[in-house]
Image: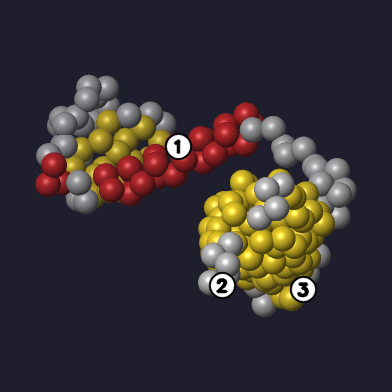
Amino acid sequence: MSCCSGKSLNDNCGNSTSTVTIPQNAIASPVVCRLPCVREFSTSIARFQNQIVRNVLIALSQRCEALTPPPVPLPPGTLILLSDTTTFNQSLAATVTLDIEATAINSVNVTLQNVLFEIIGFASVIVRVSGDAVINVSYQGIDALTHTQTAVIPFAFTETIAGNFPPNVVVQGSLSVNSQLVVNDVDPSTLAIAAVSITLFFATNIRILLPVV
């Protein structure tokens, strides 16, 4: 094939098979091409390049489709993760009044039980997190004996997960005590510890999932 710029074919084109260098400023100018046994036709370098690009993209797309296996369908009931959110902005304040006034607090341990995550509203997803905080206080009483006292403090709070979710989503989550603040309440008349005020700060992870139907 031979091509040359300009509206007419010159002696340098003809049936020559040599490479013809086209000036850069002639990129959009018409060219005349001649193929063996084919009537000469006129096009432009820009249109010729665009056609090559289209053909290459089509070939690459077809090759990718051939190399990429079709997706394997997920079995019904498989959960697909839609959102994974962690927040640290919930807290719980509780006061444990001691059965016997104390001269010292040995330890304050907190465990969580009966934690439940429930979806209670849509317009985004509103998740209600509830459960019990079990507070174990070990202290030295004014009777010189070591005492252990347990208090169960129920709690509930909500988290709003922004997004546009279908109505059949399910919720999973985890809740842990990120930190705690303990303050001793002293009886001014005896200067002994009468109660312990505890503030718990929760770390909450909420996952919204969609089951495959």
According to the image, label 3 marks what residue? 120
Residue 132 image position (x, y, % from top left): 77, 61
The residue sitting at 82% across, 57% down in the picture is: 114
Total labels: the figure holds 3
> Is residue 161 shown to the viewer in this render?
no
For marks 1 and 3, give the one nearer the viewer: 3
Q: Amino acid at mark 1?
A: Val
Q: Are marks 3 and 2 in contact (CB under 8 Å)?
A: no
Specify whether 30 is left or right of 148.
left
Q: Amino acid at mark 3?
A: Ile
Instruction: Tell me if residue 177 comes above or below residue 68 in the rendering.
Output: below
Question: Which type of secondary structure does the marked residue at label 2 adopt?
Answer: loop
The residue sitting at 22% across, 22% down in the picture is: 18
For marks 1 and 2, give the one nearer the viewer: 2
Q: Say which quarter of the image contains residue 90.
A: bottom right
Q: Amino acid at mark 2?
A: Ser
Q: Say which quarter of the image contains residue 54.
A: top left
Residue 100 image position (x, y, % from top left): 72, 60
For marks 3 and 2, give the one nearer the viewer: 2
Specify whether 37 is left or right of 199.
left
Residue 170 image position (x, y, % from top left): 78, 59
Gap in Å between the C-alphas at discs 1 and 3? Answer: 53 Å
According to the image, label 1 marks what residue? 56
Looking at this view, is 173 or 39 the one in front? 173
According to the image, label 2 marks what residue? 189
Residue projecting furthest to the top = 18
Q: Which quadrant: the C terminus?
A: bottom right
Give whichever of discs 1 and 3 has the lower sequence position: 1
